[in-house]
Image: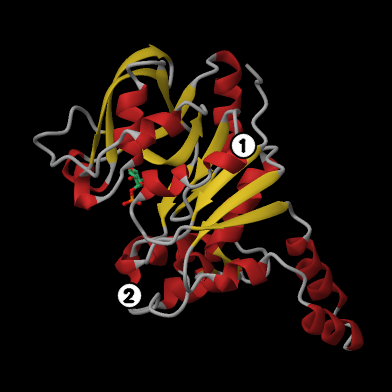
Amino acid sequence: MNKLITKAVFPAAGLGTRFLPATKASPKEMMPLVDKPLIQYVVEEAVSSGIDQIVLITGRGKRAIEDHFDVAFELEEDLKAKGKHKLLSEVQRIANLVTFCYIRQKQALGLGHAVLTAKRIVGDEAFAVLLGDDIIDAEVPALKQMMDVYKRYPSTILAIQKVPKSQTQHYGIIDGKRIEDGIYLVKDLVEKPSPHEAPSNLAIIGRYILTPEIFSSLENTKPGKGGEIQLTDGLRLLMNKQPIYAYEFRGKRHDAGDKLGFLKATVEFGLKNKEFGEEFRSYLKKLKL
Ligand code: G1P
């Protein structure tokens, strides 16, 4: 099996209901964390992990994402004419990050269904899936860490993190057998179980390395939680044919698709900002809380 992962699928057709009304007419993926849209953080993580083709699953109302990663002729001419070279090179850099192709998911039928729409473009090779709500701040990009695990365990790899037991209903939860530090062999998976049904507190976070066999599993997956075709359920079927591993990545994950999670991420990324982080810190300290 080819051990290099070069393609990544980005499901981005979701309706962003957790963030209404902000997401009524604008894609949630374009909400800015300090000065970059959320999706750009995740694209940059993929690119710095070695991905050279991104398959973005979009839907109605998501055109701004395509425009963001395209050239912006008028804007570039304007920046050139005004001598704003730093901004110009940043704007141009974004368009040259990586090759994109776009697939429209006509109906939001679930994450598993979104991944399935990429079947023909991905073909017969292992690939990555990255979810834009999960922003992972890590010294070594989380996907790169997973690729390193994949070299030793060339099969499906799920990113996981321990969560408080009271939070299991927000995640896919695995039951696993620890085989080495931070790596588990998955014995079962459940999508969003209530705390008393959850087999553990090991939650799937939005980074996956999937083998092409996931597609036939997804084709046979019935609608599950919320009436949607769940990736977790597809993985549960796949588990009967191939081993699935879970990897506890090193890094801090922010749930930026949630209002409070987004606010926390904004504060933490704001504090780290080279230009105004210190000023922001002293502003926060002075707030009468
Ligand atoms: C999706 C998956 C879930 C996973 C989560 C990670 O859920 O279905 O298994 O734990 O992403 O963020 P969503 O948050 O899209 O509802």
Q: Quadrant of the C terminus?
A: bottom left
Name of the residue lying farthest toward the top: 179
Describe residue 107's horizontal placement relative to residue 268 as left or right. Answer: left
Foreground residue among 244 and 120: 120
Q: Quadrant of the N terminus?
A: top right
- Mark toward the start of the polypeptide (1 vs 2): 2
Name of the residue lying farthest toward the left: 196
- The amino acid type found where label 1 is placed reads Val
Residue at the (43%, 17%) spot, across then down? 181
Residue at the (42%, 21%) spot, across then down? 245
Tell me where residue 203 appears, x and y as whole percent.
31, 36
Describe residue 113's horizontal placement relative to residue 125 as left or right. Answer: left
Tell me where residue 39 appears, x and y as whole percent.
55, 59
Tell me where residue 30 appears, x and y as whole percent.
53, 69
- The amino acid type found where label 2 is placed reads Leu
Which mark, by number, is residue 140?
1
Decide: few, some or many residues near mark 2? Use Cα within 10 Å; few <14, some 14-19, many ≥20: few
Secondary structure at numbered mark 1: loop
User: Quick check: 261 above or below 123?
Assistant: below
Residue at the (46%, 44%) spot, across then down? 115
Residue 79 image-quadrant placement: bottom right
Foreground residue among 281 and 169: 169
Residue identified by numbered label 2 = 20
